[in-house]
Amino acid sequence: DADVTQTPRNRITKTGKRIMLECSQTKGHDRMYWYRQDPGLGLRLIYYSFDVKDINKGEISDGYSVSRQAQAKFSLSLESAIPNQTALYFCATSDLGWNTGELFFGEGSRLTVL
Amino acid sequence: AQSVTQPDIHITVSEGASLELRCNYSYGATPYLFWYVQSPGQGLQLLLKYFSGDTLVQGIKGFEAEFKRSQSSFNLRKPSVHWSDAAEYFCAVGEHAGNMLTFGGGTRLMVKP
């Protein structure tokens, strides 16, 4: 089983619908992240959480919200999806140690908003 | 604010040829630099990282990268490319005090037989 699991892997929805993307990890890491990938733009940080009680906005948080339900679970919600939120979304984790720098990624959730 | 530029969106090389992928960064302090690879349908995997010390760093899968402060560059190299290296490659710069990474736009590598 993958260390970082994202569900669903693919989702097609309509404008205005509420969508939740879920992420769970078995690595035991405290830090979790949600990134969005768009062609030519690389990955951009949406939200991050350094522990269960800590939630921080990233570069592009507008239109998104998150919930850290447990150390192992970090969900991303789109309250009212719009077409320009069509993208590939990645969850990632990292160890507490700042000097490792390595992120461990899930396989991605492809979201299409019609 | 930190930023990363990967000037080449697509690169095609022949199998067995050498490879260099360019990365330029902008960061006020000493950067923490990374290269990640994304194979089709997969998440990103760390190839190598530079924090300090020797400016030539070795990574997995036969890749290496050289940090050149004077050029604000961290180019990725491989002496002989294999067909399995076809993927998208991302350069990233990290904040000094944490695990916040800023990614470049990526370079898609295609390998000709």
Image (cartoon, coloured by chain):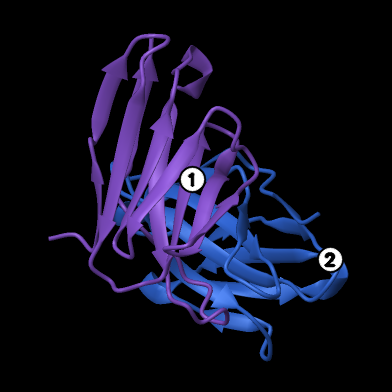
Chain colours: A purple, B blue
Q: Chain of mark 2?
A: B
Q: Residue under label 2, please give it.
A: B71
Q: Nearer the viewer, mark 1 or mark 2?
A: 1
Identified at 51% across, 33% down, the residue is A64
Label 1 and label 2: CA atoms lie apart by 29 Å
Identified at 64% across, 42% down, the residue is B8
Q: Chain of mark 1?
A: A
In the depicted view, which residue is nearer to us: A3 or A96? A96
List x then y, in percent, for residue A101. 53, 73
Q: Visible in this render: residue B25?
A: yes
Residue A99 occupies quadrant: bottom right
**In the image, what residue type sits under mark 1?**
Tyr
CB within 8 Å, label 1 to label 2: no
Q: Visible in this render: residue B111?
A: no
Q: Residue under label 1, please give it.
A: A35
Depicted B110 relative to depicted B50: above or below: above
List x then y, in percent, for residue B62. 41, 74
Horizontal arrangement in the rendering, residue B82 relative to residue B88 (left or right): left
Horizontal arrangement in the rendering, residue B49 relative to residue B46 (left or right): right
List x then y, in percent, for residue B40. 31, 43
